[in-house]
Amino acid sequence: MKDLNDLLAGANLDSEILAISNKVLNKERITDAEGLKIFKDAELSHLGLLANHIREERFGHHTFFNRNFHIEPTNICVFDCKFCSYSRLLREKDDSAAWELNEEEIYDKVRKYDGIPVTEVHIVGGVHPKMGIEYFANIIKNIKKIRPEIHVKAFTAVELEYMCRKAKMSFKEGLTYLKEHGQDSLPGGGAEIFDEDIRKQICDDKCSTAQWLEIHETAHEVGMPSNATMLYGHIESPEHLIDHMSRLRTLQDKTNGFNTFIPLKFRNGNNQMSHIKESSVIDDLRTYAMSRIFLDNFNHIKAYWPMIGKETTKMLLNYGVDDIDGTIDDSTKIYSLAGAEDQNPAMSTEEIVKLISQAGRHPIERGTLYEAIKDYGVEESVA
C-alpha cells in the first residue's frame, strides 16, 4: 500500500482522479459519476495499477480455473439478437448450421467424461419452443444420475424467462422446480447491456433488464448463486457500461448471490452487427480494470478465455482478473462462430496451469463456488 500511495502522490494526476483513486485505496465506494470520470479520463496504466492492487490485496497471485465442459442442446432460437452469430431462428431449423440434440446425445456428452475429474457442466443454448422446463428438469435429473457429484450450472435468464412463461410458472416456482431436480447455479448470460434504449436496438425481443435482474434475485433467494456478464464493445458508451455495473452492484448489495463478473467482448463475425469494429486490446484492458475497481462487492472478475483469447487473458491477470474459467474441451461454439481466435476452444489442465504460471501467477483449481480443489505450485507437475 505504501508504495502505491507514494506512486500516486508522485504522479501528475488530475486532482479529481487522484481523489477518486484515494477512495479506492481506502476501500471507499466510488459513485457512478466518479467511476465514469476515471473510466473516461484516467490513463490505462493508472486503472491497471488500481485494479491490480485490489486483485492482489484479495487474492495475492492466486488465479482460479476449473475443469468443466459445456452442453449446448440446440442453437435453434425464437429470438433474434443482432449480435448473435450462434443461433438459428426457428424458421431456419433446416439450415445445415442448426442443431438439436436428443436426450441420449446429451447424456452421451456427460458419459464421455466418465473417469475424468471434471467438476462442472455448463448448459446453455438457443431458446427452443419444444424444450420446456419439464424437459430440462428431467435432463438435469438424469445427468445427476450419471454423474451425481457434478455441479450443474444451467440456463441464462433469457432461457428461464421463456421457460417459466411457457409453463405458466412464476420465476420462483420455476427456479425452485429446477433446483429440486438438481440444478445448482445460473450462468450470467443474457445480461448484454441493461440500458433499455441500447437493449431495444440489439436484442429487443428477449427478456428485459428488469426480468434479468428479477430472475437472478429470485435465484439467490431460493439458494442458487449465479454469475453476471456485460457485453461491451459495440454501440454502447462508457456511461452505459457504468450504469450496467451499478445495477449489478446494487443487486449484489441486496443478495450477495453473484459469484463472479464476466465482461464479454462483442465479436463481429457472422452476425447482423458485423459492420461494427471490435474493441481494441487497450479497450479490453480498460474495461476489465474498471470492472474490478467499480464492483467492490464482487469477489471475482473472470476473463472467459475462449472469447477474449489466451494472450489477452494473460495480460488481463495484471488488470484485475483473478479467474479464467475452465478447460471447456471444445464444447462450446458461441464465440468461435463469431470469429473468436480459438476456433476449437479447449485447454488441458496442464495448459491452463502453464498459461497462468507464464503470467507470473499461482494456479488454483476451484469448484464452481470457488472452493479450492488443488493448489498447483509453479514447480509442481500436473497429475
Image (cartoon, grey):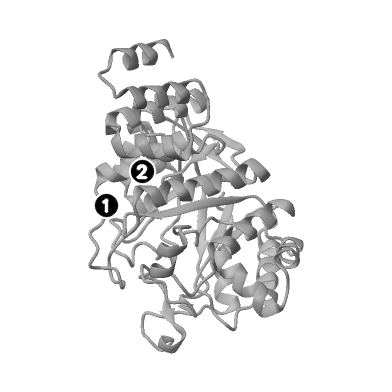
In this rendering, does residue 290 appear at all?
Answer: yes
Check disc 1: other Cα within 10 Å, few if <14, some if 14-19, many if 20+: some
Front residue (pair 110, 315): 315
Query: CB under 8 Å between callouts 1 and 2?
Result: yes
Front residue (pair 244, 312): 244
Q: Secondary structure at mark 2?
A: helix
Q: Amino acid at mark 2?
A: Thr
In the picture of the structure, the residue carrying the numbered disc 1 is 279
Q: Residue at x 51, y 45 (%)?
A: 246
In this rendering, does residue 383 appear at all?
Answer: no
* Image spot of residue 49 (x, y percent): 35, 26
Q: Residue at x 53, y 55 (%)?
A: 188
* Image spot of residue 27 (x, y percent): 52, 24
Q: Amino acid at mark 1?
A: Ser
* Image spot of residue 170 (x, y percent): 72, 69
Q: How far apart are the alpha carbons under marks 1 and 2?
A: 10 Å
Q: Secondary structure at mark 1?
A: loop
Q: Is residue 325 above or below residue 58?
A: below
Sequence order check, earlier mark of 1 and 2: 1
Q: Which mark is residue 287?
A: 2
Q: How many marks?
A: 2
* Image spot of residue 151 (x, y percent): 63, 53
